[in-house]
Image: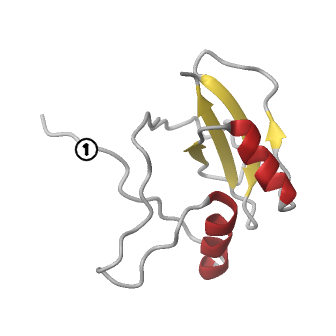
Amino acid sequence: MERVTGIGGVFFRAKDPEGLAAWYEKMLGVTPVPADYTSLPWEQEEGPTVFAPFSIDTDYFGDPQQAWMINFRVVNLDRMIAQLRAKGVEVVVDPESYPNGRFARLHDPEGNPIELWEPKE
């Protein structure tokens, strides 16, 4: 059976697409989509990716109006949290360490939930 090899993109509606793309670049290092086909898009490092539909009534994303949440892998959660907080971003750290790693939550300027994940080595 043929199967997909990874996530090729994450697409979602935004009130201010250009401003939101700039925020993701400034806060998380995710470069915006290139303006032409001669430039390369942001590339993620190889690693695990979870694809998980949730029940329609989940509270995992927070606001029930949110239909999606993105999870970014990070190498050092503590350094990423410090960097974001230094830029004025509110980050909530999950105090528990799980068998698969540690997590923290934040929201982009439009209220979309973001989870940061430091996988356990």
- Left or right: where does residue 2 sit relative to residue 32? left
Q: Quadrant of the N terminus?
A: top left
Farthest left residue?
1
Residue at image point 45% right, 63% down: 42
Quadrant assignment, res 57: top right
> Within 10 Å of the Cα at label 1, are there few (<14), some (14-19), or many (20+) other Cα atoms?
few
For residue 8, above or below residue 105? below
- Percent position of residue 44, x then y: 44, 51
For residue 119, above or below residue 76? above
User: 56 or 63, which lies in front?
Assistant: 63
Quadrant assignment, res 49: top left
- Left or right: where does residue 102 sit relative to residue 90? left
Q: What residue type is labelled 1?
A: Val
Farthest bottom residue?
35
- Left or right: where does residue 38 sit relative to residue 92? left
Farthest top residue?
99
Residue 35 in view (yes/no): yes
User: 75 or 11, which lies in front?
Assistant: 75
- Percent position of residue 94, x then y: 78, 30
User: 67 or 45, which lies in front?
Assistant: 45
Residue at image point 71% right, 54% down: 65
Write down the residue under mark 1: 4
Q: Is mark 1 on a helix, strand or loop?
A: loop
Q: In which quarter of the image is the C terminus?
A: top right
- Percent position of residue 105, x then y: 74, 43
- Left or right: where does residue 28 sit relative to residue 48? right
Residue at image point 14% right, 39% down: 2
